[in-house]
C-alpha cells in the first residue's frame, strides 16, 4: 500500500485480504492498514542504548533513513526473521541506511526459562543475552521498562519500520516476513546488486526448543485461554532470583471464582537455580475478606538432583463472593546462583487484571509443528533463508494473526504438595 501522509511517501505493508468472515474479501479487493503505527512523525519516545545511556529514539535518525526492528528473546517469529534483517543491513550499509533492533518485553515469557524483566538492569542483561545468543551485528537499543516505544508504535515483537531522514514513518509492517523490507528500501534508496543471502552470514544454529506442559510432582498442565495477570514486585529495583508468573481462568476475573495458576521460575539471566538440599520454596497468600484459596499456602516438592532450574507450579482454587480485589503473595526460598545461596523473602501484589505487555500464555505452543522442532535463523522449519513463516496461520508479511482461543480445561495439576495452615 502506498499512501501520501503529511507530504511523505509512506509504504505501509498490508495484510493479505481475509477470507469469508474476515476483515476483507479477496474478491472485493478490500484491505486495511497494519496495526502498527504506519504514518506520521516518529513519536518522541524514550529508550536506552545497550550500555544503559538514556536516549530519544527520534535522535537516532540524524538525517538518515533508519530501520527499527523490534525483537526479544522469546518470539519465534522474530527468531526466524532477524537473520534477514542482518543480511539487509549488510547490503545497505554503503547506502547510508541505519539499522537498530529495539528490545521489548518478552512475547512468550517462560520460553526457554526466560521471564519478564522487572527493572532496566535486567532488561539490559536480556538484551546482552540476545545479542550473544543470536550473533547479531546490527546494534540494539532497549525500550523502557514501561514499554514506551512498544505502546507508542503499537508493535509486537517482530515489527519493522523505516524512518525517513525527516523522522517520518515511511514503511511499517506488523511482522517482518518475506522481502517486504527490501522492496521498500529499493523504492526509497535504490536496488542492491548481488544481495546477501542469509546462508552467507554463518549465524549460529539455534537450539531446539522442547515445550513442556505436563502434570508432574513440580509442574501442572495448563489449558489454553488463561489470562496473564498484572503482578507487581514490592521492591522492583532488587534482584528477585526467582520470579512469579500468575495466570487465571477467565471466569475467575469475571465472577471471583475459578482457578489461579502460580508459577515460580529461576531467572536464567541471573544463572539462578534451586538448591534441593535446602527446604523447598513456600508461597503464602494474603487474602481480602470474603475470599478463600485452596491452598492459600504451600511448599513445593523438590526437583531432581541436588539442584535444578525447573519451575515450581501450582493450581490454587479461588472462591470469592464478588470480583476480586488485589491479593498479596510472599515467596520464601533459597536464592542460589554461582557462589551464592541464601534464604530470601520476596513479595508481590497480584491484580486480577489482564497484563498489557503484548505477551501470550502457554498456548503459544500451538501451531509450531512437532514438539521440539528447531530452526535456523531466517528459515522455516530449519531451512536457512526461507522467507516463508514457519507457524501455521501466518501467511504474509504484516498479516494479523488471530488470538488464541480457549481450549478444554486441563487436568487438575498434581503439584499441590505439603499444604500448610492458612496464614
Image (cartoon, rainbow, N blue to C red):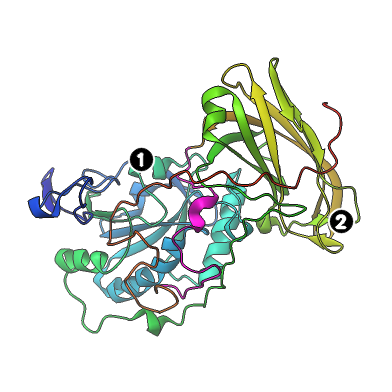
Up-down relation of residue 258 to residue 224 (above or below)? above
Residue that extends furthest to the left in the rendered view of this protein: 28
CA gap, disc 2 and disc 1: 44 Å
Horizontal side, residue 401 vs residue 184: left or right = right
Residue at disc 2, secondary structure: loop
Residue 68: percent from the left, percent from the top? Answer: 35, 57
Residue 75: percent from the left, percent from the top? Answer: 47, 58
Q: Is residue 150 visible?
A: yes
Residue at disc 1, secondary structure: helix
Residue 364 magenta-highlighted: yes
Q: Mark 1: give few (<14), some (14-19) or many (20+) Cα within 10 Å.
A: some
Up-down relation of residue 23 to residue 64 (above or below)? above
- Who's the residue at 47% across and 73% down the image? 375
Residue 188: percent from the left, percent from the top? Answer: 17, 63
Residue 407: percent from the left, percent from the top? Answer: 49, 46
Q: Which one is nearer the viewer's eye here, 382 or 27? A: 27
Where does the magenta region start and end?
356-378
- Who's the residue at 46% across and 67% down the image? 369
Total marks drawn?
2
Q: Earlier in the sequence, mark 2 or mark 1?
A: 1
- Who's the residue at 21% across and 43% down the image? 40
Up-down relation of residue 23 to residue 17 (above or below)? above
Q: Mark 1 points at which residue?
A: 152
Q: Which one is nearer the viewer's eye here, 16 or 205? A: 16
Up-down relation of residue 157 to residue 356 (above or below)? below
Horizontal side, residue 155 vs residue 295: left or right = left
Q: Name the residue under label 2.
A: 276
For the N terminus, which image quadrant?
A: bottom left
Q: Mark 2: give few (<14), some (14-19) or many (20+) Cα within 10 Å.
A: some
**Main secondary structure found in the magenta portion:** loop
Q: Which one is nearer the viewer's eye here, 66 or 227? A: 227
Amino acid at each position: 500500500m502506498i499512501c501520501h501522509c503529511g507530504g511523505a511517501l509512506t509504504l505501509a505493508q498490508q495484510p493479505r485480504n481475509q477470507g469469508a468472515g474476515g476483515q476483507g474479501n479477496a474478491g472485493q479487493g478490500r484491505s486495511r492498514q497494519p496495526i502498527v503505527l504506519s504514518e506520521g512523525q516518529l513519536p518522541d519516545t524514550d529508550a536506552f542504548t545497550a550500555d544503559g545511556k538514556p536516549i530519544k529514539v527520534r535522535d537516532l535518525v540524524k538525517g538518515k533513513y533508519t530501520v527499527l526492528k523490534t525483537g526479544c528473546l522469546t518470539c519465534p517469529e522474530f527468531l526466524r526473521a532477524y537473520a534477514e534483517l542482518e543480511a539487509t543491513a549488510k547490503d545497505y550499509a554503503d547506502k547510508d541506511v541505519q539499522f537498530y533492533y529495539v528490545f521489548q518485553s518478552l512475547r512468550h515469557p517462560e520460553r526457554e526459562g526466560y521471564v519478564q524483566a522487572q527493572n532496566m538492569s535486567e532488561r539490559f542483561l536480556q538484551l546482552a543475552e540476545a545479542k550473544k545468543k543470536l550473533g547479531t551485528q546490527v546494534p540494539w537499543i532497549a525500550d523502557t521498562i514501561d514499554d514506551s516505544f512498544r505502546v507508542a508504535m503499537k508493535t509486537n515483537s517482530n515489527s519493522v519500520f523505516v524512518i525517513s531522514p525527516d523522522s517520518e514513518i515511511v514503511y511499517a509492517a506488523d511482522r517482518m516476513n518475506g522481502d517486504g523490507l527490501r522492496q521498500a528500501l529499493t523504492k526509497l534508496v535504490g536496488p542492491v546488486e548481488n544481495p546477501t543471502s542469509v546462508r552467507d552470514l554463518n549465524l549460529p544454529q539455534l537450539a531446539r526448543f522442547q515445550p513442556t506442559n505436563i502434570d508432574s510432582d513440580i509442574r501442572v498442565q495448563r489449558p489454553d485461554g488463561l489470562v496473564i495477570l498484572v503482578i507487581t514486585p514490592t521492591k522492583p529495583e532488587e534482584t528477585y532470583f526467582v520470579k512469579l508468573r500468575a495466570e487465571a481462568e477467565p471466569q475467575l476475573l469475571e465472577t471471583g471464582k475459578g482457578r489461579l495458576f502460580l508459577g515460580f521460575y529461576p531467572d536464567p539471566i541471573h544463572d539462578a537455580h534451586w538448591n534441593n538440599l535446602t527446604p523447598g520454596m513456600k508461597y503464602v497468600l494474603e487474602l481480602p475478606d470474603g475470599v478463600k484459596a485452596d491452598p492459600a499456602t504451600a511448599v513445593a516438592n523438590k526437583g531432581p538432583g541436588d539442584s535444578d532450574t525447573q519451575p515450581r507450579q501450582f493450581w490454587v482454587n479461588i472462591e470469592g463472593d464478588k470480583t476480586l480485589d488485589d491479593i498479596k503473595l510472599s515467596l520464601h526460598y533459597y536464592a542460589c546462583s554461582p557462589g551464592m545461596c541464601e534464604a530470601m523473602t520476596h513479595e508481590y501484589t497480584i491484580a486480577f487484571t489482564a497484563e498489557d505487555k503484548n505477551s501470550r500464555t502457554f498456548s503459544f505452543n500451538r501451531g509450531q509443528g512437532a514438539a521440539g522442532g528447531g530452526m535456523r535463523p531466517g528459515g522455516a522449519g530449519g531451512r536457512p533463508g526461507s522467507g516463508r513463516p514457519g507457524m501455521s496461520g501466518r501467511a504474509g508479511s504484516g498479516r494479523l494473526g488471530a488470538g488464541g482461543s480457549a481450549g478444554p480445561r486441563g487436568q487438575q495439576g498434581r503439584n499441590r504438595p505439603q499444604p500448610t495452615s492458612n496464614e
